[in-house]
Image (cartoon, rainbow, N blue to C red):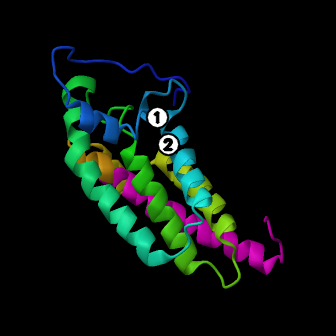
Amino acid sequence: MKLIKRKEIVNPQYKVNKLFLLISSFFGLGFSPYASGTVASLATAFLIFLFHLSDVFPLLIIAIVCFLIGVFVSGDAIGKYGKDPSVVVIDEVAGMFVAYIISLVFSPVGSDYIQCLIGAFIGFRFFDVVKIFPSTYFDKINNAFGIMMDDVVAGVYGGILSVILNLILKFLKITIW
C-alpha cells in the first residue's frame, strides 16, 4: 500500500462528467495526494461527529442514498482513471456509514456514539486495506457496483470489529470517551 498515490490518468481523452467526478471524489477529497480513502473516511467521521448523527433510521437512509448515488456516478471515472480509481472515494463514505450503523446497533448498551464512531473508523479502514472475501471478489469487478460493494463489505466487517472492541471495553470497564 502506497501512502502517496499519484492520480494516474490512463485515458486522457476520456471526458469525465464533472458533476459525477465532484460527487464520486466526495467534493474533491479523492484528489488528496495522501491516503485519499483515509481522508474521505475521516471527513465522514467528522461530519457524523459534527452533526451528532446517532439515530439509526436517518443514517440508514443516508447510507443507502450514498451507495445508490455512488453506483450511479463512480463508474464514469473508470474511463479516465482506470480500474478502482483512487479519486473515487464515495465508496469510503458509504462504507464508513455501514460500519458506524452496525457499531451503533449492535454495541453493548451504554456505548457512546463517539466510541462507536472511533471503532467503526478503525475497523473500516483496517478491512478496507486488508480486503478479505467477499471484498476481494467485488474488488475484481471493474464497474461502479464493484467499486461500491468492496467498501460496503469492508464496512460490515469494520462494524463487527467495532462491536467486538466495544464488548471488550465494556467487559474491562474501560471508556474511551
**174 part of magenta stretch:** yes
Q: Amino acid at mark 2?
A: Ala
* Distance between mark 1 and mark 2 Cα atoms: 6 Å
Q: Is residue 145 visible?
A: no
Q: Return the residue nearer the eye: 79 or 44.
A: 44
For mark 1, what is the residue? 29
Near mark 2 (Cα within 10 A), the count class, few <14, some 14-19 or many ≥20, is: many
Residue 125 in the image: above or below residue 118: above
The residue lying at 43 percent from left, 48 percent from top is 92
The residue lying at 38 percent from left, 58 percent from top is 152
Q: Quadrant of residue 170?
A: bottom right
The residue lying at 16 percent from left, 23 percent from top is 15
Write the start and end of the magenta stretch as one range: 149-177
Residue 84 coordinates in the image, percent (x, y): 31, 36
How many numbered discs sit on the rendered protein?
2
Q: Secondary structure at mark 1?
A: helix
Residue 42 coordinates in the image, percent (x, y): 57, 46
> Furthest residue to the bottom?
109
Near mark 1 (Cα within 10 A), the count class, few <14, some 14-19 or many ≥20, is: many
Left or right: residue 36 compared with residue 163: left
> Furthest residue to the front?
51
Residue 37 coordinates in the image, percent (x, y): 48, 39
Residue 101 in the image: above or below residue 41: below
Which numbered marker is on residue 40?
Answer: 2
Residue 112 in the image: above or below residue 45: below
**53 part of magenta stretch:** no
**Dots 1 and 2: beta carbons under 8 Å?**
yes
Q: Secondary structure at mark 2?
A: helix
